[in-house]
Image (cartoon, rainbow, N blue to C red):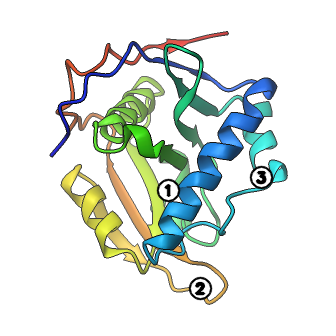
Amino acid sequence: MHSNILLPPLTLRRAVPDDLPGVLTLLADTAEWLHLQGVRQWPRGGFGPERIVPLIEEQVLYLLEGHFGETVATIALDGHADAEFWAQADEPASALYVHKLAVSRAAAGTGLGDALLDWAGGAVAASGLDWLRLDCSKDNPRLQQYYRRRGFRHLRTVDLPHRASGALFQRPAEVRTCVAEGLFRTLDLVDV
């Protein structure tokens, strides 16, 4: 259930190099929150710039920006299928993959994650591809249930001892589940 908080106008746009500090802070805050929940999805303290700068340079990292320029959420969407997870039988090129989806704690529960997943599905469909895919912690049933409720199907869990992730999910590109319409304006990508 989403809260009834009215959000200010939000803008979805590609991240640029100047956004790096805000993105790193959001990811670190999210990683710490996950850690406090007992989830080891991401490294405690978040990610170093060496993991985020390439996403910005490839122009596959997007951020949802509030009225005052604050980073409210982030998502990466690309065609990079993790070879440790996605096999040739999965037809990796038939999908786009979500990475680094995070919503600020202040905006948690407002449906922004749902809206970003729906936006990503629309981008997949517009690319002429079939699937929106992601992986998440194999030991986080709460997050896995979140994805199931949003139309994702669990394909399998890959258990690699050196990785916390490994639960693989996909949903058809055309699926939309966002129930938060009206809380904020339609997410349209703004090029900067």
Instruction: Identify the residue at image location x=65%, y=33%.
Output: 60
Calculate the distance from the C-alpha at mark 1 to the C-alpha at mark 3.
25 Å
Q: Which residue is mark 3?
A: 51
Q: Say which of marks 1 and 2 sits in front.
A: 2
Instruction: Identify the residue at image location x=57%, y=61%.
Output: 31
Instruction: Identify the residue at image location x=44%, y=52%.
Output: 133
Q: Which residue is mark 1?
A: 91
Instruction: First in sequence, mark 1 or 2: give its number.
Output: 1
| Element under disc 2 | loop
- In this picture, residue 172 sits left or right of residue 78: left
- Residue 95 seen from this side: no
| Type of the residue with mark 1 | Glu
Q: Say which of marks 1 and 3 sits in front.
A: 3
Instruction: First in sequence, mark 2 or 3: give its number.
Output: 3
Q: Quadrant of the C terminus?
A: top right
Tell me if mark 3 has few (under 14), some (14-19) or many (20+) residues whose alpha carbon lies within 10 angstroms of its own.
few
- In this picture, residue 44 sits left or right of residue 181: right
Q: Specify the farthest residue to the bottom.
A: 161
Q: Which residue is mark 2?
A: 160
Using the image, tell me which numbered label, if any, was put on residue 19. Answer: none
Image quadrant in which you'd find residue 8: top left
